[in-house]
Image (spheres, grey):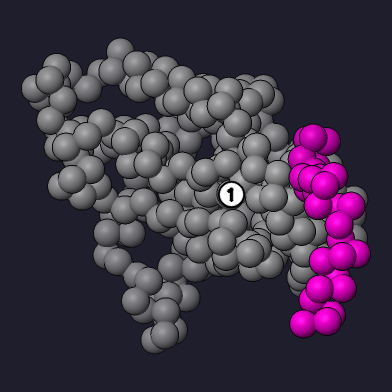
Amino acid sequence: MKEMNISDFKVSNQVKISEIKSFVDMDASEETLEKTLETTREKLGKLQDTLYAHGKYAVLVCFQGMDAAGKDSLIREVFKDFNARGVVVHSFKVPTDLERKHDYLWRHYIALPARGKFGVFNRTHYENVLVTRVHPNYILGELLPDIHSVDDVNEAFWDKRFDQINEFEKTISENGTLIFKFFLNLSKNEQKKRQLRRLNKPNKNWKFSPGDLDERELWNDYMRCYEDVLNRTSKPHAPWYAIPADDKPTARLIVASILLEEIKKYKDIKEPELDPKIRAQISEYRKRLEND
């Protein structure tokens, strides 16, 4: 299998989405990829235990991608070996009535992981500069004081929203949250294959919605918005990683490897040391239990 360089996937400079790969050949069989993922996620699971015990950092993992990009299965496979108490997954759908009564970031703020835990956002706060940008009429449903018509949803509006999102991430980063943002870059042709599979397999029909085809017709609009997102919001403290998503086993391994290698760089993440007074009495505690 080819050696992986995770920096190849990090968005560090201005990018053109048409030039980002949706497939990479790892020169490995699916079985090899899955076995390597198993080893990687076991290490990641142990690291999560240490992070939980350490209790100083939270980890926020964000996934964005077009329909059928494989977000659900990727989350299931990458985090399979995590202790359930240390990871929480949030799937953000259309805002509820309660959520609309708050600012658009409110529901994301309240879902942020506590220190010592992983939080996974399946679709994220970036929906607010992706879906709503492709469909600006959705902004009217937010009942914003200065927005009276779609004409008010102009470039100045989006500039302000990008500033707010960048500030949101800067704030939580400065307060101990490690942020990872993954764009699952699925090709239009591969999406077609996966959507047809949903229609052709009865047990997958439930995943299909006619609205998915309407959104597919807006593919180019979405790609322009994704390109803007990557270029305007990939920061050192909250980087984007563009993950080739046409092959699911490869995408899962890349994501798991990035998380493992990047979090390992925080050398202060260690299990807390036992109180010296307690350590000095361990033999006594052991005897008490053995004689019980």
Check residue 289 for magenta coloring: yes
- In the displayed structure, does residue 73 sit left or right of residue 162? right
Mark 1 closeness class: few <14, some 14–19, many ≥20 residues within 10 Å: many
Q: Is residue 137 visible?
A: no
Instruction: Give residue 221's position: percent from left, percent from top.
Output: 38, 37
**In the image as oriented, which residue stretches furthest toward the left?**
148
Q: Is residue 123 above or below residue 170?
A: below
- Residue at 90% in and 64% down: 283
Mark 1: which amino acid?
Lys
Check residue 254 for magenta coloring: no
The quarter of the image holding the N terminus is bottom right
Label 1 SS: loop
Q: Is residue 202 above or below residue 193?
A: below
The front one of 64 and 236 is 236
- In the displayed structure, does residue 215 sit left or right of residue 1? left
**In the image as oriented, which residue stretches furthest toward the bottom?**
202
Instruction: Give residue 235's position: percent from left, percent from top.
Output: 61, 23
- Residue at 34% in and 16% down: 160
Report which quarter residue 54 is drawn in.
Answer: top right
The front one of 30 and 123 is 123
The quarter of the image holding the C terminus is bottom right
The front one of 191 and 105 is 105
Which residues fall within the magenta stretch?
Answer: 264-292
Instruction: Give residue 193's position: percent from left, percent from top.
Output: 51, 68
Would you name the residue on which mark 1 appears? 117
Instruction: Give residue 245's position: percent from left, percent from top.
Output: 61, 55
- Residue at 27% in and 59% down: 211
Q: Is residue 171 above or below residue 31?
A: above
Count of residue discs: 1
